[in-house]
Image: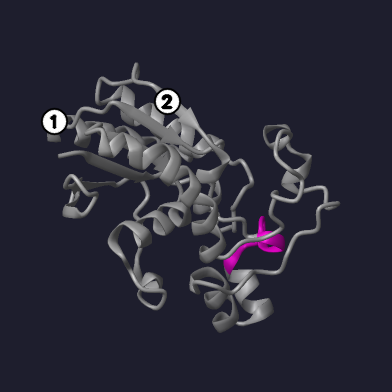
């Protein structure tokens, strides 16, 4: 029975300052490092051993994965990084303080942008200096693929090919997998894995640095879900 562990990265510097982050590459805060280390200790205490690790191409997720693996004595396992596990792109909201955005656009509008399933944020143009099109880590992507903004629906659509091609086959081969990524890319995966409706997904929260463990049967039906540290 294969296990999948999802970890939202530890608190980032922009989580701490309450800014929309998205694809902006910010680091972990001191508290975020502690959370990632604790995740590794919880995994070790639970006796979970991995065969494969996946993460995004963003520093906060990569470091979280490395801390979690180091403190569970598994830093050596194979690791794959992919843009498909990146946080959802918050478009022109990226870098803005969430409270200030709420004052500017209204609490209800900002809540809709943050939590709705299929409403896009204000888009960031490809010629904006903050566009991911200017980032070397995306240089090999078709420029039309690099987003100017995403909602959860679009995030799920870009995560799913990686799930189908890489992650699901590992689980079907009875391999244990760890994914360290982001609140919304992991919410998207959880939506698919658990069959959560478009309306109910708004209520799913992912705590920073908390390992969420799924057990699957031979057909990738979830047989158990556990949050370590609760």
Residue found at x 13% / y 30%: 47
Residue found at x 72% / y 62%: 92
Labels in figure, total: 2
Residue 16 lies, with reference to residue 65, above or below; the image says: below
Residue 228 seen in render: no
Residue 41 seen in render: yes
Horizontally, residue 199 falls left or right of residue 140, namely left
Q: Residues within 10 Å of mark 1 (few under 14, many from 20)?
A: few
Q: Is residue 18 magenta?
A: no
Residue found at x 56% / y 81%: 107
**In the rendering, which numbered label is found on residue 47?**
1
Q: Nearer the viewer, mark 2 or mark 1?
A: 2
Quarter that holds the N terminus: top left
Residue occupied by mark 2: 79
Q: Give the range drawn in magenta.
A: 91-98
Q: Residues within 10 Å of mark 2 (few under 14, many from 20)?
A: some
Q: In which quarter of the image is residue 101?
A: bottom right
């Amino acid at each position: 029975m294969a296990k999948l562990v999802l970890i939202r990265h530890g608190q980032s510097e922009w989580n701490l300052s309450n800014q929309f982050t998205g694809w902006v590459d910010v680091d972990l805060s001191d508290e975020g490092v502690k959370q990632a280390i604790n995740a590794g200790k919880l995994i070790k205490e639970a006796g979970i051993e991995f065969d494969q690790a996946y993460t995004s191409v963003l520093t906060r997720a990569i470091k979280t994965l490395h801390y979690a693996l180091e403190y569970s004595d598994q830093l050596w396992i194979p690791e794959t990084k992919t843009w498909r596990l990146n946080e959802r792109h918050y478009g022109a909201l990226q870098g803005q303080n969430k409270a200030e955005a709420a004052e500017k656009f209204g609490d209800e509008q900002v809540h809709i942008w943050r939590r709705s399933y299929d409403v896009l944020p204000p888009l960031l143009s490809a010629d904006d200096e903050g566009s991911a099109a200017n980032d070397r880590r995306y240089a090999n992507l078709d420029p039309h693929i690099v987003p100017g903004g995403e909602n959860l629906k679009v995030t799920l659509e870009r995560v799913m090919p990686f799930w189908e091609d890489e992650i699901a086959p590992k689980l079907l081969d009875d391999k244990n997998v760890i994914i360290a990524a982001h609140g919304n890319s992991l919410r998207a995966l959880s939506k698919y894995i658990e069959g959560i409706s478009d309306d109910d997904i708004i209520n799913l929260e992912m705590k920073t640095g908390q390992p969420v463990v799924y057990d699957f049967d031979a057909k990738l039906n979830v047989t158990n879900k556990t949050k370590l540290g609760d």
